[in-house]
Image: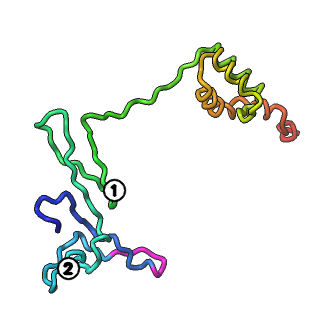
Amino acid sequence: MEGENSNYHYRECLRNHAASLGSYATDGCGEFTLDDASSPPNHLHCAACGCHRNFHRKLTYIVAPRASASDDALNIDYDRHAVVEYSPAADTGKKRFRTKFTPDQKDKMLAFAEKLGWKLQRKDLDDEIERFCRSVGVTRQVFKVWMHNHKNAFSSTSAASTGNASSLTQ
């Protein structure tokens, strides 16, 4: 294939031979086999099925650094096209920070959001919104996200009570 120290291995053929019929059928080729018998050697076509190498599922082997040198192992990426590096021992992804609100902050934000009609689109109220956010102790973005997350829960209860719920019971 690509040499002794290759990080790739091509597995079964995934070519759909019945695509023109609107169906799905593979030829059963289990692994890409190098075509050395042809003259000149064709390194991109499989000797077993004749398909191009791109039709075969590509396994990518990546050695990831681990916490201890004795634990070195191979990680396999089963994606046919992307190469992704894994680091299972040292997950460096930071946990997302969740904003905690006091009950007083929640009450004030609820009242202000209802006053605004659950929309921050009004440019004429920018100064008032900024003053409110400073007084409550949150940023405008945090208030915007809180409104987005809670507008259905709070605005739907008031809309349902004034809606056509009475017509369903009559």
Q: Residue furthest bottom?
A: 39
Give residue 132's mark.
none
98 in relation to 14, above or below: above
Report the quarter where the N terminus lies.
bottom left
Please name the predominant secondary structure of the magenta segment in the image: loop
Tell me the residue that label 1 is attached to. Answer: 82
Q: In screen coordinates, is 40 left or right of 130? A: left
Q: Position of residue 136 (x, y in %)?
A: 64, 16
The residue that appears at 26% across and 40% down in the rendered structure is: 87
Q: In screen coordinates, is 80 left or right of 6? A: right
The local crowd at label 2, few if under 14, some if 14 to 19, many if 20 or more residues have their Cα within 10 Å, is some
Q: Secondary structure at mark 1?
A: loop
Nearer the observer, 18 or 34: 34
The residue that appears at 47% across and 81% down in the rendered structure is: 21
Q: Position of residue 6 (x, y in %)?
A: 16, 60
Spatial CA distance of label 1 from label 2 is 24 Å
When asked about the image quadrant of residue 106, the answer is top right
Report the quarter where the C terminus lies.
top right
Colouring used for the render: rainbow
Nearer the observer, 160 or 104: 104
Under mark 1, the amino acid is Ala
Q: Residue 25 magenta-drawn?
A: yes
The local crowd at label 1, few if under 14, some if 14 to 19, many if 20 or more residues have their Cα within 10 Å, is few
When asked about the image quadrant of residue 26, the answer is bottom left
Q: Which residues are magenta?
A: 20-26
Q: Are marks 1 and 2 in contact (CB under 8 Å)?
A: no
